[in-house]
């Protein structure tokens, strides 16, 4: 196994040093057919043209890939190693192209929290699906920071300040972060005062590295002290329920207005992070997919 790995690595290093990938594809077909004549027929070229391309390849590589004896050809030792490597490489490329084509045919996958999907997107979604029946749309529940490639997500909709690197970020709509509490903690704050109470209350975060509460304390002109009892709850729906249950304070957005109206949640301060909102996040160049651009244009139009 070590010998095979070494040979393949050497051939791959050689492949990186030359640019005749079209010629390499011709070599791959000749090696499979073991005949210049049959390869020429498969490629719709003349036998002379195929032979010439193979000679050019051998000159660029610096070694022979075929033995030529009395009108017959056979692979040299190095030629066989190159063929095995090229076969694997071309097979991988073909599989990847097929996967990408299938992904396009399936449509687009949009990642978001179930919180956003149910509270904002769901009432509007029928307008997209009915007007664009040709676009296959999949909503993928996600929470926290995600790797769009590993999750096979074409676009994510995220709440925050939009300061995410290594991707294209577009604002969808403003939705400031406000400090919320359940009834029991809200009563305590009203009685003792926010400044006196907050240092003894558990703060709920959406991620371990979130700076939202630090930013909020700065805007509120209050000292921030990290505590061992702070909770990280990535799922916004679970975080809302934890606040209602009296588990602590959380920064929520205006999509909890129903809970506030029903007296389940209480905004305990007028201080807000006004730069927070919902953003579209996707890989650079992703909008070359017409279906994804169509969704992006539609969802932005829904915020006007």
Image (cartoon, rainbow, N blue to C red):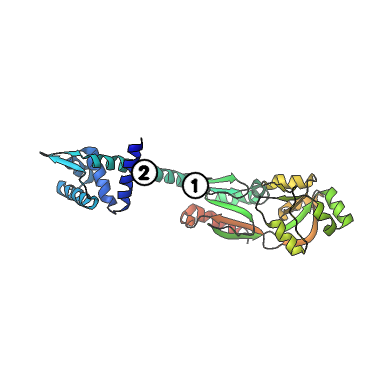
- Front residue of 273/156: it is 273
Few, some or many residues within 10 Å of mark 2 (<14, 14–19, 20+): few
CA distance separating discs 2 and 1: 20 Å
Secondary structure beneath dot 1 equals loop
Instruction: Where is residue 73? Give x, y as percent.
Output: 16, 39
Give the label on residue 107, or none.
1
Quadrant into which the N terminus falls: top left
Residue in the image at 22% along x and 50% along y: 62
Taking the spot 30% from the left edge, 53% from the top edge, the residue there is 17
Image point (24%, 38%), residue name: 32
Which comes sooner in the sequence, label 2 or label 1?
A: 2
| Mark sitting on residue 94 | 2
Q: Please state if 207 lies on the left or on the right of 94 as rendered.
A: right
Towards the viewer: 226 or 29: 226
Is there a contact, CB below 8 Å, between mark 2 and mark 1? Answer: no
Residue 79: percent from left, percent from top: 24, 42
The residue sitting at 46% across, 45% down in the picture is 103
Under circle 2, the secondary element is: helix
Relative to 34, is 219 on the left or the right? right
Q: Residue 129: percent from the left, percent from the top?
A: 56, 48
10 Å neighbourhood of mark 1: few (<14), some, or many (≥20)?
some
State the residue lying farthest toward the top. Answer: 1
């Amino acid at each position: 196994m070590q010998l095979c790995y070494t040979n393949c690595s050497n051939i791959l290093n050689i492949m990186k040093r030359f640019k005749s990938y079209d010629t390499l594809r011709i070599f791959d077909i000749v090696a499979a057919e073991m005949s210049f004549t049959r390869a020429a027929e498969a490629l719709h070229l003349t036998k002379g043209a195929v032979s010439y391309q193979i000679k050019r390849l051998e000159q660029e590589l610096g070694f022979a890939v075929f033995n030529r004896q009395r009108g017959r050809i056979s692979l040299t030792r190095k030629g066989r190693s190159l063929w095995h490597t090229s076969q694997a490489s071309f097979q991988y490329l073909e599989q990847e192209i097929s996967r990408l084509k299938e992904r396009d045919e399936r449509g687009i996958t949009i990642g978001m929290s179930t919180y956003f999907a149910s509270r904002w997107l769901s009432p509007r979604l029928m307008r997209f699906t009915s007007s664009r029946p040709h676009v296959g749309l999949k909503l993928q529940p996600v929470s926290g920071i995600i790797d769009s490639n590993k999750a096979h997500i074409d676009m994510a909709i995220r709440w925050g300040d939009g300061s995410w690197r290594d991707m294209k970020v577009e604002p969808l709509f403003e939705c400031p972060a406000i400090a919320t509490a359940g009834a029991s903690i809200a009563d305590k704050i009203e009685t003792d005062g926010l400044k006196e109470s907050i240092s003894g209350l558990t703060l709920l975060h959406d991620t371990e590295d979130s700076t939202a509460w630090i930013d909020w304390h700065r805007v509120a002109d209050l000292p921030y002290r990290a505590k061992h009892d702070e909770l990280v709850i990535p799922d916004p729906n679970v975080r809302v329920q934890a606040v209602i249950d009296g588990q602590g304070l959380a920064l929520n957005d205006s999509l909890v207005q129903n809970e506030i109206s029903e007296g389940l949640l209480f905004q305990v301060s007028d201080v807000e992070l006004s730069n927070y909102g919902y953003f579209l996040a996707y890989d650079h160049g992703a909008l070359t997919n017409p279906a994804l651009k169509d969704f992006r244009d539609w969802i932005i139009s829904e915020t006007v």
